[in-house]
């Protein structure tokens, strides 16, 4: 069973935490992970780019110059693509819904594998808690430096469940707890550092993060969620 180093918010090592083998020994098909990441990126696109063709451009219908006598090529209208302000040929138009459905089991398998990679490469540590009496960016910055975190850093905290009504159907979602309010304010001023709850992360968040710092409670929740 793998172990993760455990730190307090002052940056001092205070022990270790056991990690479930289902995370450290997770396996996934490489192609399915790629398909999952590509689908995530595609689903972020708005598909709202729009251009006007020559029938949609508002312009004068007067001929730009006489058809004969100038020795130049004849031109019938200023809305043609070769003129500035004319219509666009084969330009982008708003498309229908391009959302790619992601299979829930494949999604969890991909996240589980990517989390396991961070653990195997010693790019993941545990912090006792993220509770702060007041927002203090300096405290979080000193913690990051003490733990020798470089590049993108992802902080993960525990979540609480909240029921919402979606088209008459009650669903449960994970939301940030009140204890993280001051920490969230403290971390948002640190470049390349961000905070989220463990059950709301995506595989892309894990993949682009250089190091992951997670609370012990969040690690337990994530293990249950991914297992």
Image (tube, helix red, strand yellow):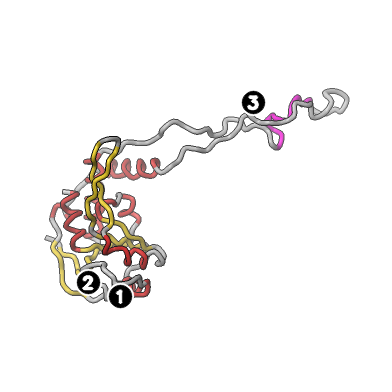
- 136 shown above or below 46: below
- Mark 2 burial class by Cα count in 10 Å: few <14, some 14-19, many 20+: many
- State the residue at coordinates (40%, 41%): 42
Q: Which residue is mark 1?
A: 146
Question: Could you say where residue 141 lies in the image, as x and y percent from the top left?
Answer: 35, 72
**Label 2 close to label 1 by CB (< 8 Å):** yes
Q: How many angstroms separate mark 3 from mark 1 (CA)?
A: 63 Å
Q: Which residue is mark 3?
A: 55
Instruction: State yes or no: residue 79 in magenta.
Output: yes
Q: Which mark is residue 7?
A: 2
Q: Of discs 3 and 1, which sits in the foreground? A: 3
Q: Answer with the quarter of the image where residue 34 lies.
A: top left
Question: Could you say where residue 81 lies in the image, as x and y percent from the top left?
Answer: 67, 31
Q: How many angstroms separate mark 3 from mark 2 (CA)?
A: 65 Å
The mark that comes first in sequence, 2 or 1, is 2
The secondary structure that dominates the magenta segment is loop
The mark that comes first in sequence, 3 or 2, is 2
The mark that comes first in sequence, 3 or 1, is 3
- State the residue at coordinates (33%, 74%): 139
- 78 shown above or below 215: above
Helix, strand or loop status at disc 2: strand
- State the residue at coordinates (78%, 25%): 74
Q: Which mark is residue 115?
A: none
Q: Which residues are magenta?
A: 74-84
- State the residue at coordinates (15%, 51%): 224
Viewer-side residue, 58 vs 15: 58
Q: Residue furthest top?
A: 68
């Amino acid at each position: 069973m793998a172990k993760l180093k455990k730190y307090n918010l002052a940056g001092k090592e205070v022990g270790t935490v056991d990690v479930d083998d289902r995370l450290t020994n997770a396996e996934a098909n490489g192609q399915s992970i790629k398909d999952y990441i590509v689908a995530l990126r595609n689903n972020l696109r708005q598909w709202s780019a729009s251009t006007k063709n020559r029938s949609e451009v508002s312009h004068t219908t007067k001929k730009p110059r006489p058809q004969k006598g100038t020795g130049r090529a004849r031109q019938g209208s200023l809305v043609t693509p070769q003129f500035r302000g004319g219509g666009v040929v084969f330009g982008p138009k708003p498309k229908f819904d391009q959302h790619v459905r992601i299979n829930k089991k494949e999604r969890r398998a991909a996240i589980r594998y990517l989390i396991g990679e961070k653990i195997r490469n010693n790019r993941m540590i545990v912090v006792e808690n993220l509770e702060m009496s007041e927002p203090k960016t300096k405290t979080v910055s000193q913690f990051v430096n003490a733990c020798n975190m470089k590049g993108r850093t992802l902080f993960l905290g525990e979540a609480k469940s909240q029921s919402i009504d979606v088209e008459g159907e009650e669903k449960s979602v994970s939301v940030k707890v009140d204890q993280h309010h001051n920490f969230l304010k403290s971390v948002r001023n640190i470049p390349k550092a961000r905070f989220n709850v463990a059950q709301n992360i995506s595989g892309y968040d894990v993949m682009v993060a250089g190091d992951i710092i997670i609370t012990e409670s969040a690690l337990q929740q994530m293990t249950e969620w991914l297992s």
